[in-house]
Amino acid sequence: NSCSNCIRSGAYCMWCKQLNFTKPGKQKAARCDTWAKLVERGCMEGDIISPQNILTVTKNNILSTNAFVKDEPVQLRPQEVNLKLRPGFGSFVDKTVLPFTNTNPEKLKKPCAEKEQFCQPAFGYRHVLSMTANDADFKREVDKQRISGNLDSPEGTLDAIMQAAVCGDRIGWRNSSTRLIVLTTDDGFHMAGDGKLAGILEPNDERCYMDNQLYTKSNDMDYPSVGQVASQLEKNNIQPIFAVTKNMENVYRVSRLSFFQSFFLFFFLSFSIVINVNICNAVTY
């Protein structure tokens, strides 16, 4: 899964460094092959790495003839896995039209309760931060977020997931990475057909509509169905993880039946406790 491991694995093994050479969701190991196979699969010759081997002997003692005592036997491998995460961040509320959101100009600017001092204007879905390896950037953007509000309980969750799934270039998904969407919410979601309540009749076409970090078709296009979202997650090799409050357990467990074959994890959040859970096996298998 790395250039160095590849070229060390065999005399004829070479590495393709070409950007997005692998298909969406495929592992980096696909970049390692023979020169002929890489060229056949579309890798430009100038992007094939095959350095000359250099051997430097630093220590070459004669083998001992005495038996030695072995250390504690290793019974599991690997013993430790380091994850290289590139988190991104997006936020959502709902469509900014009646009956989902109060359209009074003052309420659009401040849809929260009067006692809330830190409230941002109503919006559908906003892509806040593209995938980044800088943990400080991610933490800073999350800390900067302010709450917003709408009228009814369900939210524009499926609008948000759909745009995060299909706007690959904007979000920053990499072809060779394991892709995860972690949804954190304390409420349910609107789905296809609910848009008719606001006179929105155009079906969701499962395409990307992102301008200036905002979903521009929020008030013009209906919510996607659970099936549409599931189809795009599967097509783009994205694993959803639901982090919901206890009262939403049944809502998201039922929705699981319509999603593609995938493992769902439910974190019952109190929003005052951080829960660390080992999800490696669940996501892998």
Image: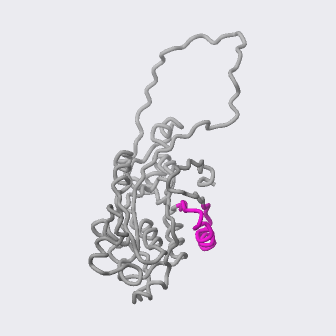
Residue found 70% across the figure and 27% down from its top: 73
Of residue 232 and residue 153, the one placed in the foreground of this image is: 153
**Magenta highlight range:** 239-264
Reply yes or no: does residue 256 show up in magenta: yes
Q: Is residue 107 left or right of residue 180?
A: left
The answer to whether 118 appears left or right of 158 in the picture is: left
The x, y position of residue 171, in whole percent, is: 38, 61
Q: Looking at the image, which residue is at 56% across and 62% down?
A: 245
Q: On screen, 187 above or below 129? A: below
Residue 141 x/y as whole percent = 34, 53
User: Can you name the residue that lies furthest to the front here?
Assistant: 115
Q: Nearer the viewer, residue 188 or 182?
A: 188
Residue 42 appears left or right of 249: left
Query: Which of the image's four quarters has the C terminus?
Result: bottom right
Q: Residue at x 35, y 64 (%)?
A: 116
How many numbered marks have been drawn onto this rendered protein structure? 0
x%, y% of residue 32? 49, 46
Q: Residue sitting at 48 percent across and 75 percent down?
A: 153
Relative height, residue 198 to residue 45 (above, below): below
In the depicted view, which residue is nearer to us: 116 or 38? 116
Q: Percent x, y for residue 267?
A: 58, 57
Height in image: 229 above or below 277? below
